[in-house]
Amino acid sequence: MQTTQAAWPVKTRELHNHHFDSTIWNDFQFRDDDIVIATYAKSGTTWTQQIVSQLIFQGEEGLPVAEMSPWLDLRIPPKEIKLPEVEKQTHRRFLKTHLPVDALVFSPKAKYIYIGRDGRDVVWSMYNHHANANQLWYDALNDTPGRVGPPIGRPADSISAYFDTWLEQDGEPFWPFWENVRSWWAIRDLPNVMLLHFRDLKDDLPGEIRRIADFIEVEIRPSAWPRIVEHCSFAYMKANATPSVPLGGAFWEGGAQTFINKGTNGRWRDTLSAKQCEAYEARARAELGEACATWLASGMRGQDMGGRNAAA
Ligand code: A3P
């Protein structure tokens, strides 16, 4: 049976806020072997950057992954500084984005990896990220040239209230959640798009690393395999967080180890009421449709996704 392939995505808008400057993609010169690692945020971006770095460099230790794999659409440093830096890179590039598909320039040749995570887990991770951010973080986001829209404020004292605001105001105080997930899900059948899920990474890290290797067409040297798997484990990444985390963790109280926090899902279960969970789940189904909402909640394993995005 033939499946119809979605058309190549076209950029239809720009996104600007305290974090974003999506216009950088308009001037970005793609190479055919570029890899783009995309998430809404707090969904396993750093983990996937680590996996991709380990595959490209066959388990090498001490790679400055955050520096090698910049968040392109973060407006700091500005594109005049960031673009020449990525242009200078001679290794296979792997870039990070948090944009929805329609705010990106999409290359038919580059490989795109999108990682999903249940929105409740995202908020738990985001609260830790935001509540531990130091003054440097606020200064960089709020007081540097190029910010569009309101500054980002301090988080609510209670994580439950933070969650309610995020759900009721779609991503507030970061950016809209549902459109981000929906836009990537819609193009999952393109030959150069791969969906990953945080839970699948946790359930079967070696299997998912191999799936990523196949997708980005990296052959794993058997002698490198044990190192690759070890270097992508939570324990290793927590103990060696500094080179993997943005600015070595300088924006957070407790440094890089605050960013690589717990690495678990479901921490919201003890805090959110049944009513809050129902509101989240109903919204997820309404925004994403049944299949995508199910994937976002539980990943691919056990689901019939069909094709390349099926569970291994
Ligand atoms: P928690 O805050 O829930 O612990 P991102 O890189 O998109 O900002 O996502 C950060 C989340 O990924 C954090 O989740 C962090 O702990 C988790 N993470 C990073 N590396 C991990 C690993 N090797 N194993 C499990 N979780 C990891």
Image (cartoon, rainbow, N blue to C red):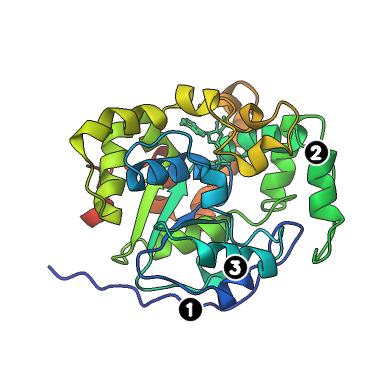
**Badge 1: how crowded within 10 Å, few (<14), some, or many (20+)?**
few
Q: Amino acid at mark 2?
A: Pro
Which residue: 40% across, 38% down?
298
Which residue: 41% across, 45% down?
53
Q: Give the residue at mark 1.
A: 10
- Residue 191 can be seen in this image: yes
Q: Amino acid at mark 1?
A: Val
User: Residue farthest to the left?
Assistant: 1
Q: Quadrant of residue 210?
A: top left
Q: Give the residue at mark 3.
A: 84
- x%, y% of residue 58? 31, 41
Nearer to us in this view, 216 or 100: 216
From the viewer's perspective, is residue 230 above or below residue 221?
A: above
Nearer to us in this view, 101 or 304: 101
Distance from label 1 to label 2 (Cα)? 35 Å
- x%, y% of residue 113? 40, 54
From the viewer's perspective, is residue 274 above or below residue 39?
A: above
Residue contact at pointers 1 and 3, CB within 8 angstroms:
no
- Disc 2 is placed on an element classified as loop
Q: Give the residue at mark 2.
A: 155
From the viewer's perspective, is residue 241 above or below residue 173?
A: above
- x%, y% of residue 304? 25, 47
Front of the two marks 2 and 3 = 3
Mark found first going from the N terminus, 1 or 2: 1
Q: Quadrant of the C terminus?
A: top left
